[in-house]
Image: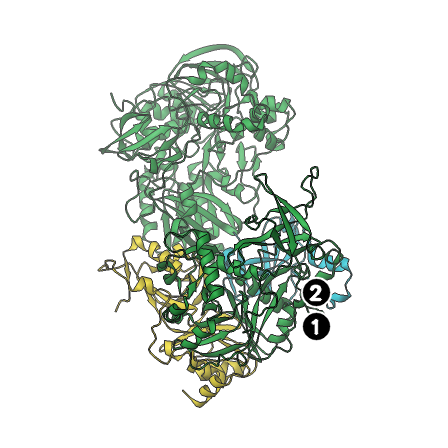
Amino acid sequence: MFYIFCPYCDEHREEEEFHPKGQAHLSRPADPDACTDEEWGNFIYFRDNPRGIHHEIWVHAIGCRKFFNVTRDTQSYEILESYRMGSAPRITQLTDKQQS
Amino acid sequence: MTQFNRLDNGGRIDRSKLLSFEFNGQRYKGFAGDTLASALLANGVDVIGRSFKYSRPRGIVAASAEEPNAVFQLGATEATQVPNVRATQQELFDGLVSQPTSGWPSLSFDFMGVFGTLLGRMLPPGFYYKTFMFPQAAWDTYEKYIRKAAGLGRSPREPDVDTYDHLNHHTDVLIVGAGPSGLSAALSAARAGARVILADEQAEMGGSLLDSNDRLDDKPAAEWVKATLEELARYDNVLLLPRATVNGYHDHNFLTIHERRTDHRGDRAPANLSRQRLHRVRAKWVVLATGAHERPLVYGNNDLPGCMLASAVSTYINRYAVVPGSRLVLMTTNDNAYRTAFDWQDAGREVVAIVDTRAYVTGAWQEEAERRGIKVLKGKAVIEARGGQRVTGALVTGLTTDGNKVAGDSQLLRCDTLASSGGWSPVVHLSCHTGSRPVWDDDVIGFLPGKTVQRQLVAGAVNGRFALDDCLTDGASIGAEAATNAGFPAEPAIVPSARTRPETRAMALFCIPHHKRNSRAPKQFVDFQTDVTAAAIELATREGFESIEHIKRYTAMGFGTDQGKLGNINGMAVAAKSLNQTIPQTGTTIFRPNYTPVTFGAIAGRHCNDLFDPMRYSAMHEWHVKHGAKFEDVGQWKRPWYFPKPGETMQQALDRECLATRESVGVLDASTLGKIDIQGKDAREFLGRAYTNAWAKLPVGKCRYGLMCKEDGMVFDDGVTSCMGENHFVMTTTTGGAAGVLEWLELYHQTEWPELEVYFNTVTDHWATMTIAGPNARKLLAELTDDIDLDKDNFKFMDWRQGTVAGVPARVFRISFTGELSYEINVQANYGLHVWEKLFEHGAKYNLTPYGTETMHILRAEKGFIISGQDTDGSVHPYDLGMSWAVKEDKPFSFIGKRGMKREDCVRENRKQLVGIKTKDPSIVLPEGAQAVDDPNHPVPVPMLGHITSSYYSACLGRSIAMGVIKGGHNRMGDTVHYPLTDGRVVEAEICSTIFLDPKGERQNV
Amino acid sequence: MSEAVKEAVAEPALVAIMEQLPKTEVPARSPLAHHTEVLSRPTHENPGVRLWENALRTHLALRGDAGSADFARGVEAATGLALPERLQCHQSGEWALSWVAPDEWLLTGPGDQALAMEMSLREELDGHYAVINLSGGQTMLRLSGPKARLVLMKSCPYDVHDRHFPVGKVVTTVLAKSQATIRRVGEEDWELVVRRSFADYVWRWLVDASQEYRLSLGHPE
């Protein structure tokens, strides 16, 4: 059971209030009709599955209904930061301390 | 004679409260304050079960959670049966009824013993794999007997009469264990004002301080415990939870605590009290003060009743005033266990000898033994116990100084109790739950909690600090650190001093060698509950298992309900030695939640029976109940399924409902359909992006049907959306899809198109919706409204109007899911029941008939209308459904799904397409899911064409109708396909249009 | 009815606004009427928990840009209540304005004033905003008494401790397997706004959770 910081409610909340929505920072191609089948296939089907840092979208479904991003360590399940839609993550790699 | 092992004085029992209890059909007496185990020992009950594989008699070994043998079935009635209760953790109450769970068919009749050799050979390590894999079909037979003999207990056959509940907590500091470390940690944290939860699995807090005759500040330790608990109880910010086992340590410092609230009070919980409670705790910081479990030594016949942990013997003497025997031999690798011999002697019984495996050891403990006149045999070990149903002697032999071999002659010491101590294993279980690997420490001779990402601190014995002084000071400073970390600057509490004898170095010894090889020696048990011996582990390594995780699974070591609390370290040591490795090289298995078994009741809490899941009701629900509706679950909604009249079968009811609607007028409670209010100047633009069809020109006052796809082009929801105002729409969704569609719209709005000015809010529950359908629908509505012009040219199909229905302001939508003239009346839900009842007052003359979801399904299928989620399954795009009319390709914005439905696979020939299916025999209703084939005589595998998605008997058409997907179906109109059914019939059917009734749509345009 | 209201009701333009309450005597039925009408349980002298439905109130969802001074001013002009900060509620008389999300508030008040309030808001507000009438889709429960907090602890994973949930705070969170917008009205007094279709489940859950605390059902008078 995660304890997730909602950057809109400015509080930690229990995982039961949230729904996970997958990998973050994927943009819908600006002109889908110009995409090849392969490009569109990559957009809708292919996702990263990293060991370590993962940026992902969650929605505060039972709460403020806002979508936001978290940076999570997929090994330790630590959530390293939560940040609002449209902003960039501060943490993009594990520090030595987190890695060891 | 009763309770002949009970001392006249001492202990923490209340001799004035005599309790009667039952074990294995016999009546016994004990005292308040006893555990079931201490009471059995007081009564001299030696054999409390028989072992899993070899059916050997077993006795009580331990005094706490680590007990492997005394695992019982409790309950005086069928409904109160509880399996897997540790007698060492069950407080005695008057009238307690317990049964051994092992030892089938009976404790005294040694069933397995009769066939002993035979079965012993049958059950080598890996016996599950070797014996029971084939034939697979026979497993059901095997399993029944294995389970029965294995002592896993049984579930009650009647519903539990007690209740269980959950309580959520948030705390600054959770302290696990109320021994000396936990108590002093709690003092430090509590005094700083932090919110503190102190949980302990025992009835009384104090831990080892209650089991010993330790003194603190020259007073009995129990006095300090009492004063400390009194102080803690005074703080508002402290919650003391006795009888509460912290069972699981999960992500982000979430811990579960299993509290047994009334298990000590009787067979059933008192009225209005839950029997057990699961506390769900989110802690800022956790202090593990879980202590250590004593490790038994492994030697021949070490499972005979009378072989016990040294510390357990002391606990029974000091806490329960029970001396479980007369003549004690104590074998130890360390000084600490000497106290058991002293306790035994103080209790007035004979200590035959202390057998110390260390050859050269002198110090305070040995001096004390000498002063007491207790014989200490140094450099020796008990290599086997002798006896039948109970220990009668200990065979003692010299050891080489490394402990690897026996040396010299043996002597037999007569005794009835053989206590052993191989040192202490820190209770690292909870720390392991967090994914942390424990780390071996040569000085501690045990595993310590490893690094963790959790906000966790450890104090006292779990941290390898076994001396009482260290535990107290460590606890005080760790408690202060935890509180400080949680934002409450704290000073370590001043703790009393404990004068303990200095201890000399212990010896790292786990399995005592024998004259014979382990495989020939009397059985040396490592894991009592799963009957795993040292020889079995050696055999596993010889068979090529090198990883400790594989050895565990092959031998079943640690697989019992005790999770190998006693045996695991010894097992790893045996494996390491056999593999010529060190213990750290061999590593350890990881403990997982839960620490001790948890009842299903506690896990379920109140989420059971009528509260298992929300039941959502519409505003007209009471009417439906009163009128005998049968209900169908649609998501969490209870929707009327059909309304049978007395004596009607389901099909008769459906036929009647269908015909009444088509011939006159029917009414459906459609309140459950999802309704989303959309406001904002970009609402129309947004709809154009989210739906596949056009929305740019839909005028105010009009409604339109839309399909919603995912980016892969596959349909996932559909519904009618109405234009309420230039900047205002109300979207309807499927009943089950409502929440998902709203979240989907928000996802795109918040992550892709935040620049669009639009707000989405659910209004599903705000409107009560009733659909009247049928040729007389207009007449009926006309009786209830005087401000809506119902003229067919002024209020057309796919229009909506605002007005008053039955005196209530309403929005009326002229839309149809039946193909009939139909009006959907929406009123504020608090008036829904009123309007519904008025409809029936006026509808009687039109035979207004309520219909449920099943009739709705039939009526729409007659018209070929799809149900998203029934005729679609996430692999069907609009063209597959033959709904190209609902896709507007030339919209300026590339709407969701447009690109997806153009991918190569989506435009290929021979996709499965939705068609109508008519059986040649009109009376056969195909089962939904039936697979279509062209040639039923084709040798297997038969190429599959598709399956039936919807299938009904249509009373209006007097025949069965179905829809289904068929490969290339749109070009196969009139073809014959076959549906082979599971009952052997092959049903012939014709592919046809999905529209079975009124293909021109004339009925709804009247 | 003001002229503006009449006009809006008669001629929906940008948004459809309607008086949703009947002009004549038509019985309204709250989502929990089937429980509250038949209360026959013994009422405890000194209850640990009281539970009742504050039925048939006005519930309006208000959407807009919290950062816009015009929006905040408009809301205050219409409601007399300043736009509350995150997780806060402002109350004046019968009206309460609760923060729900950065762009959403819940306005509750007397049951017969939904349209008047909506019109008043629409008169004061401009630009991108929305008012949604939810009066039929929600109901309000009141839970009070010394043990009310324990009942909430059984029901909600949210921290309802005094230090974390002071009077005036409002939070939307999980309640059993449903959800509620929970407001702490007083030291021992809580308000729960729940969806109509879940109200029966929530009521039964709370009644069950209160059994060990001497529950009294019904308004305390």
**Chain ID, yellow in image:** C
Residue B170 visible in the snapshot:
no
Residue located at (78% from left, 61% from top): A36
Q: In this view, does B566 lie above or below B403?
A: below
What subunit carries mark 2?
A: B
Q: The green chain is which one?
A: B
* Three-letter residue code for mark 1: Lys
Q: Mark 2 points at which residue?
A: B898
- Please tell me which of labels 2 and 1 falls first in the chain: 1
Q: Is residue A86 left or right of residue B925?
A: right
- Front-lying residue, B772 or B678: B772
In front of the other: B872 or B815: B815
Local crowd at mark 2 within 10 Å, few (<14), some, or many (≥20)? many
Disc 1 on helix, strand or loop? loop
State whether residue B657 is above or below residue B314: below
Q: Point out the residue furthest to the top here.
A: B409
Q: Which mark is residue B891?
A: 1
Q: Quadrant of residue B588?
A: top right
Shade of chain A as shown in the rendered figure = cyan
Q: Which residue is drawn at 26% across and 59% down?
A: C47
Mark 1 falls within which chain? Answer: B
